Image (cartoon, helix red, strand yellow):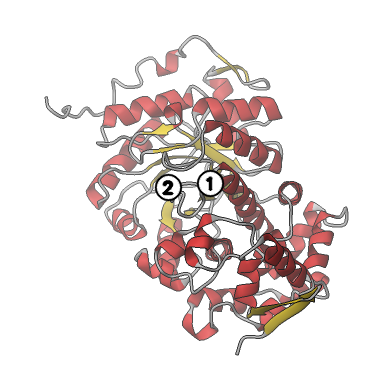
Amino acid sequence: MAQTYHTTVGSRRYRFNGLAELMAKATPPRSGDRLAGVMAESAEERVVAQMVLAELPLTTFLNEALIPYEEDEITRLIIDEHDTHAFAPIRHLTVGDFRNWLLSDQATSEALTAVRAGVTPEMAAAVSKLMRNQDLILVAKKCQVTTAFRNTIGLPGRLSTRLQPNHPTDDVTGIAASILDGLLYGSGDAVIGINPATDNVAQSVKLMRLMDEVINKYEIPTQSCVLTHVTNTLEAIEQGAPVDLVFQSIGGTEATNRSFGFDLSTLAEAETAAQTLNRGTVGRNVMYFETGQGSSLSAGAHHGLDQQTCEARAYAVARKFNPLLVNTVVGFIGPEYLFDGKEITRAGLEDHFCGKLLGVPMGCDVCYTNHAEADQNDMDNLLTLLGVAGCNFVMGIPGSDDIMLNYQTTSFHDALYARRVLGLKAAPEFEQWLEKMQIFEDVSTHRLNDRLPAAFANSLRHLPQEPRYGA
């Protein structure tokens, strides 16, 4: 039976029926929690819930499961793999004490790395609910998570980008043109990743071979990924396709992931299969996950939890499989879950903080849909804040407009802006390649070469051509 949490403020007594309700009521406002009926009824109730949450011992989250152990494999994963040794230095803390420690000078990058395996997603979510935006930025900045495949991502002073050359008809020439455009702006060190318009194995393999050909021809120290379902990628591996990274969208409950068509055993099979290909040169992180607040609610699989806590639980899934990349597609699901620029900004900072605290290599798709109360100025703000916070990677898309998925995100120019204004660099191996190919005249200042490098002069000519629609 769930414990009841209560307190009295003035003449009014507040009662929270269980940890899930307390967590939800303590969450900063957002439209998804309002839609789910779990949000605090007033600002006063929210502050009271935060006060009660601050006094809660961290050990509470080991003794009271938000979703019963017997009903959810994500809960079992979190409990079974909790590292008591790593937890020992912070075991005596309350949630409020934990916040104070995270913000203190004692919580160095080394100290945060040492305790991360002892922090559960629920602990991370709880402490984030007590933090201002600047707190989330400060602590995330201290959390370094580094991964590698053909280059090294997440080093201090670096900001990588996913080059996202989507096309509404998967036209090879159109995709190749976007890849070329992105490379000439220094984009693509995190991954060249395509969302296929036609999601089947044959089309995925075709796109994998296209990207593999470009990467090999120009000896680009990066990795490719077709963001198709994990089972399609497994079949592509069986067919001998050049698979670098295995992709899957993940959620924070077993029911969410089953609605996506997989479970933890599927991901384990995929990681093992990708590892056997031995395609990495400087590392062996082969998984790429995407998440987003609201996915569990939209699947009817949130178990009454607030959407930010569900999101943090997804990072337990990610952490299990040692991914190269994880990114929260923060405004993609729509205003039903994050209504405006303010809610999107808050969610992006929360997700990045929680992921990094848990040891997950977090990036962010700084984005919004056209029916949300947001615009590119909101995205500029969030991009800049995440750059300050040490985000591992962001998206790079021609003109900020994904013409296949129909949403607005960050462009090649935006990523270049972030690197310039914050003094950030690309992954070191990719940076050396940019210099060798004379794409940048000066890699230290990201000054572009205004002459098209000779090595790329015939980039589109050697690629396989397709008949145009209507030809």
Work out whether 186 lies above or below 198. Answer: above
Q: Nearer the viewer, residue 303 or 443?
A: 303
Quarter of the image for residue 238 reads bottom left
In terms of depth relative to the viewer, which is nearer, 377 or 199?
A: 377
Residue 382, quarter of picture: top right
> Can I make out residue 221 in this image?
no
Rendered residue at 62%/65% (across/down): 40
Residue found 55% across the figure and 45% down from its top: 364
Asked which quadrant contains residue 81, the reply is bottom right
Residue 95 horizontal/vertical position (percent): 77, 68
Label 2 is placed on what type of residue? Asp
Mark closer to the chain start, 2 or 1: 1
Q: Is residue 302 above or below residue 454?
A: below
Residue 211: percent from the left, percent from the top?
36, 36
> Does residue 301 appear anywhere in the picture?
yes
Amino acid marked by disc 1: Phe
Give the residue pinned by disc 1.
149
Query: How many residues crowd around disc 1 within 10 Å: few (fewer than 14), some, or many (20 or more)?
Result: many
According to the picture, the residue beneath numbered tag 2 turns out to be 244
Residues at circles 2 and 1 in contact by the CB criterion of under 8 Å: yes
Asked if residue 364 lies left or right of residue 91, the reply is left
